[in-house]
């Protein structure tokens, strides 16, 4: 657990595939023998804490209890918690899987905030569990403060789960040590359609061992199984320690439900008894909203994933949802496609908010790449590009409309960040190389996975003139994290010059590629 959390952990019979003598991971003490309501004693927060969607003056604190409890958050300027301020949150119960979020507001800008979460017996507020502590930095209101954040995605994919022999999800410790202001998770936080086996034999004969749970022994269909899939990752000590120090901005993608899903789809997958993705996605979104602190997923905010998170005058993060509003995957050759991959309403929102933004940099957090051709079967395509290098067709029409808007409305400092494809690369798009020319040049950077299989590089579509100065990808499909590096991206914004530097890093922190971008340019 994170330093100063005050929580203790032990192994239970629920967890298999981890040798009893291994000290690499500390796992929450869990039991499925009795419902949480029947447990005696004081409430416990063994799953750690998280903070999400931090701004200059606000943030959302998340916790999960092991039984019904009142959530109370205390904040202070120092670890001593002198002159602490208390925030009374909700009562956590079975309707939210004993999770809850408390909204903090009126925080000092550009400051380190120390917080601790107390869980109190709803019937006796004097009976509280051990406090669980964390810290985060609010965004600055001035432009002179440097800013750093990381991004990546794809966790526990292709059956590669928490491996105690490797020390679990150790990439989170690499990122934590670099002390970013926040982490942008670009989707595929879980692989609901990928069960976690106890062990996998690697091509060289080595054995990959997984920590496993009952919920992750099959594909997720019920709400309880989706909740269990989100809970699985929090068994990892590295992730809980990271969450206690680094706030998140989280989006989702297909594997929160099923590979390459779209609204209205009926699955052709014998593992499922529930075939309707609309049913499965509703259950997943509910669990997603319970396990991540996301401002716009609260009932009073419309229950949506797409949003703008303002991080002071240097940065606005535009979080997209390319999953919930898309049309069906197809060959993508339509000459008219108003729904596209974003839906008409989200596209209008994005154009409006980009034009309103006065931040130096506008990071567009895209859960799918733009110019990389991502197939879905033999004839259909999963992302924007469909392999035809000519004029925009299908979902490319929406991208063309957006890029045209950015150019003609003089929107400066747009940078696209994504994950999804399980390798790392940099793409520069320019009209002089493109079939569609009514846009300004811009960059797209890809980084990931966090802990999933690596895959070969995809072809690029020439419609928007991409050029790829850097790529690192394995030469075969589904290479394990023991065989192929895992990746994360790092963005630094200099408070003095406004320069933005992107570094593509691999597990261990090694820099593979870097690019410095200058502020104030339309597109980039």
Image (spheres, helix red, strand yellow):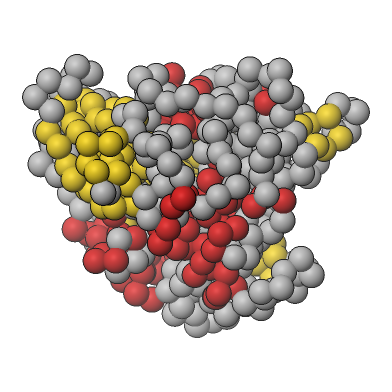
Tell me which residue sits at (38%, 55%) in the image: 93
Please state if 133 lies on the left or on the right of 380 as rendered: left
Residue in front for this viewpoint, 520 or 347 = 347
Q: Position of residue 79 (x, y in %)?
A: 23, 18
Whether residue 354 appears in this view of the structure is yes
Tell me which residue sits at (79%, 70%) in the image: 270
Please state if 393 lies on the left or on the right of 75 as rendered: right
Residue in front for this viewpoint, 226 or 249 = 226
Q: Position of residue 250 (x, y in %)?
A: 41, 48
Q: Position of residue 341 (x, y in %)?
A: 49, 69
Q: Quadrant of residue 382?
A: bottom right
Tell me which residue sits at (26%, 57%) in the image: 354
Q: Quadrant of residue 149?
A: top left
Tell me which residue sits at (43%, 41%) in the image: 40
Q: Position of residue 453 (x, y in %)?
A: 70, 41
Please state if 255 lies on the left or on the right of 38 as rendered: right
- Residue 359 against residue 168 in the figure, above or below: below
Q: Quadrant of the C terminus?
A: top left
Q: How many numbered markers are drawn?
A: 0
- Residue 382 against residue 186 in the figure, above or below: below
Q: Quadrant of residue 223?
A: bottom right
């Amino acid at each position: 657990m994170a330093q100063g959390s005050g929580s203790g952990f032990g192994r239970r019979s629920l967890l298999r595939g981890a040798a009893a003598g291994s000290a690499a991971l500390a796992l929450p003490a869990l039991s499925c023998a009795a419902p949480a309501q029947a447990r005696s004693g004081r409430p416990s927060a063994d799953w750690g804490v998280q903070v999400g969607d931090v701004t200059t003056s606000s943030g959302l604190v998340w916790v999960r209890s092991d039984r019904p409890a009142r959530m109370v958050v205390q904040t202070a300027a120092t670890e001593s918690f002198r002159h602490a301020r208390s925030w009374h949150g909700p009562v956590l119960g079975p309707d939210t899987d004993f999770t809850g979020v408390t909204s903090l507001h009126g925080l000092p800008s550009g400051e380190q905030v120390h917080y601790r979460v107390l869980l109190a017996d709803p019937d006796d507020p004097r009976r509280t569990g051990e406090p669980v502590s964390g810290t985060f930095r609010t965004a600055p209101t001035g432009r002179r403060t440097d800013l750093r954040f990381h991004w990546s995605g794809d966790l526990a994919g292709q059956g590669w789960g928490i491996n105690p022999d490797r020390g679990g999800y150790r990439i989170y410790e690499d990122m934590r040590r670099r002390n970013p202001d926040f982490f942008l998770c670009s989707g595929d936080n879980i692989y609901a359609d990928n069960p976690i086996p106890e062990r996998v034999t690697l091509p060289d004969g080595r054995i990959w061992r997984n920590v496993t749970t009952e919920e992750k022994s099959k594909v997720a269909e019920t709400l309880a199984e989706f909740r269990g899939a989100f809970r699985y990752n929090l068994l990892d000590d590295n992730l809980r320690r990271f969450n206690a120090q680094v706030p998140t901005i989280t989006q989702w993608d297909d594997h929160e439900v099923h590979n390459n899903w779209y609204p209205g789809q009926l699955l052709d997958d014998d593992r499922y008894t529930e075939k309707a993705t609309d049913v499965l996605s509703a259950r997943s979104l509910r669990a997603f909203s319970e396990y991540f602190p996301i401002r716009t997923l609260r009932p009073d905010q419309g229950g949506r994933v797409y949003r703008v998170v303002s991080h002071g005058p240097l940065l606005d993060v535009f979080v997209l949802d390319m999953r919930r509003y898309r049309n069906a995957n197809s060959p993508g050759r339509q000459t008219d496609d108003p729904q596209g991959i974003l839906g008409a309403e989200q596209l209008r929102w994005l154009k409006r908010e980009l034009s309103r933004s006065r931040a130096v940099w506008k990071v567009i957090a895209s859960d799918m790449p733009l110019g990389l051709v991502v197939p879905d079967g033999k004839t259909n395509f999963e992302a924007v590009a469909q392999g035809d290098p000519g004029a925009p067709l299908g979902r490319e029409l929406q991208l063309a409309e957006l890029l045209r808007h950015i150019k003609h409305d003089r929107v400066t400092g747009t940078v696209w960040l994504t994950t999804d494809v399980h390798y790392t690369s940099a793409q520069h798009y320019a009209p002089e190389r493109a079939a569609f020319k009514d846009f300004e040049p811009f960059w797209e950077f890809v980084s990931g996975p966090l802990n999933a299989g690596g895959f070969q590089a995809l072809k690029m579509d020439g419609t928007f003139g991409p050029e790829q100065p850097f790529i690192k990808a394995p030469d075969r499909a589904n290479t394990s994290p023991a065989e192929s590096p895992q990746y994360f991206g790092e963005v630094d914004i200099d408070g003095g010059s406004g320069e933005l530097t992107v570094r593509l890093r691999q597990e261990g922190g090694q820099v593979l590629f870097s690019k410095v971008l200058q502020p104030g340019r339309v597109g980039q």
